[in-house]
Image (spheres, rainbow, N blue to C red):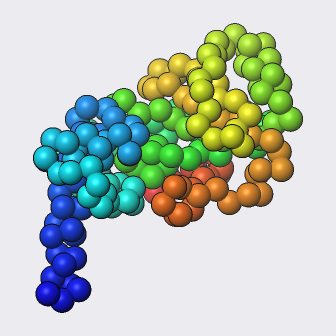
Amino acid sequence: MTRHEKQRPSTGIRASIASAAARLMAEDGITDYHHAKKKAARQLGVPEHSAFPDNAEVEAELRAYRTLYQGEDHVELIAALRHTALELLDLLADFQPYLTGSVLDGTAGEHSHIDILLFADSAKEVEIFLLNRGIDVSHVEARNERVEAVLQMETDTADANLVILPPHMERVSMKHRDGRPHERIRADALRALLNE
């Protein structure tokens, strides 16, 4: 058996898991890629030790799923989420904010959060800034040891996660678990994106 023949079934399984995980994320509101892949593998009867697709493969399937099945509704949702994100970037301008995550990359759904990166000397500084403007926030567990805090606030379109990092982290290029760069944009770039 050649090397390519051995890879074919694995590639098919990976594609099936990616497709099923994307459907779960789109329909059930799962936002964690690993959880979606594990659940998809279970549903497909694929053993846990199988090679799972990487997040980029699932993201591509999610984008295709949303285009095919959610069409214009999804386009309108992304536009609404991005407009809200722009308002947040303008509000939080003192903290060098960036939009990142599924709202930026266009894979967000009705259960998604708006992810904003902020750079501040302390999380308290951001919290006091918001409380002084009558904006209530709650604390959410950070998934990364470099993150000082994650504050969550409600908006009219979706909850927003304000991920607070120390100022020196602004120059650090963050990466996804699979090594891809974590894209992020400022308010001016988002404004230009909305005007396209």
Give me the residue at 14% from left, 87% from top. 1
Q: Is residue 58 visible?
A: yes
Estimate the x, y position of residue 114 in percent, counting from the top left.
51, 35
Q: Can you tell which quarter of the image residue 144 is in?
A: top right
**Observer-nearest of 103 and 11:** 11
Picture coordinates of residue 178, whole percent (x, y): 48, 60
Q: Report the residue at 30% width, 47% height from top.
A: 37
**Residue 60, quarter of picture:** bottom left
- Left or right, 70 with reference to 137: left
89 with respect to 21 (left or right): right
Give the residue at the far bottom of this rendering.
Answer: 2
Which residue does the image show at 29% across and 44% down from the upper left? Answer: 38
Is 155 on the left or on the right of 33, as rendered? right
* Vertical relation: 20 (above or below) 14: above
Residue 86 locus on image (x, y percent): 58, 39
Q: Quadrant of residue 90?
A: top right
Q: Going 21% across and 51% down the picture, which residue do you hit? A: 47
User: What percent of the width, then of the height, locates residue 45?
Assistant: 13, 47
Could one spot residue 78 in this view of the protein? no
Q: Nearer the viewer, residue 34 or 194?
A: 34
